[in-house]
Amino acid sequence: TEFLEQKLKLTVNRKKSAATRVTKRTYLSHRFQIDGRIGISKTAQAQMKKRVRQITKRNRGRELQVIITELTQYLRGWQHYFKLTV
């Protein structure tokens, strides 16, 4: 960190930067497991569940076909973003 701040004159965000095991951190909502597999972070899973519940809420007053279309678009995008995970 000192090298980055003093020599290169870069600002380091200490909350986001850490020297730790790769299995202890997440990167762009991906987590790396001990056996080398890539998984989805717990926060990304929770956000996805929250968004699906929001889309499928019954009191939104929307037609079923509109809900299905919106849910399909969201899940397709989510699936493509995490396609490298196991």
Image (tube, rainbow, N blue to C red):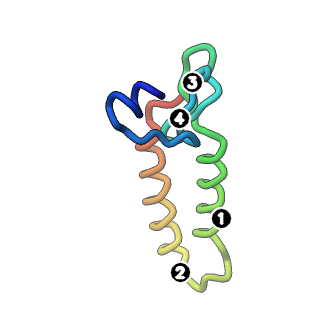
Which label was assigned to residue 63? 2
Instruction: Tell me the element at label 4.
Output: loop
- Answer with mark 1 or mark 3, whichever residue precedes in sequence: 3
- Answer with mark 4 or mark 1, whichever residue precedes in sequence: 4
User: Does the CB distance between marks 1 and 2 fall below 8 Å?
Assistant: no
- Answer with mark 4 or mark 2, whichever residue precedes in sequence: 4
Q: Amino acid at mark 2?
A: Glu
**Rendered residue at 55%/75% (across/down):** 64
From the viewer's side, name the closer residue of 75 and 22: 22
Q: CA distance from mark 1 to mark 3?
A: 36 Å
- Answer with mark 3 or mark 2, whichever residue precedes in sequence: 3
Q: State the residue lying farthest toward the top.
A: 35
Instruction: Tell me the element at label 1.
Output: helix
**Rendered residue at 49%/73% (across/down):** 65
Q: CA distance from mark 4 to mark 3?
A: 7 Å
**Rendered residue at 59%/86% (across/down):** 61
Which label was assigned to residue 17? 4
Residue topped by disc 3:
19
Residue topped by disc 1:
53
Q: Amino acid at mark 1?
A: Arg
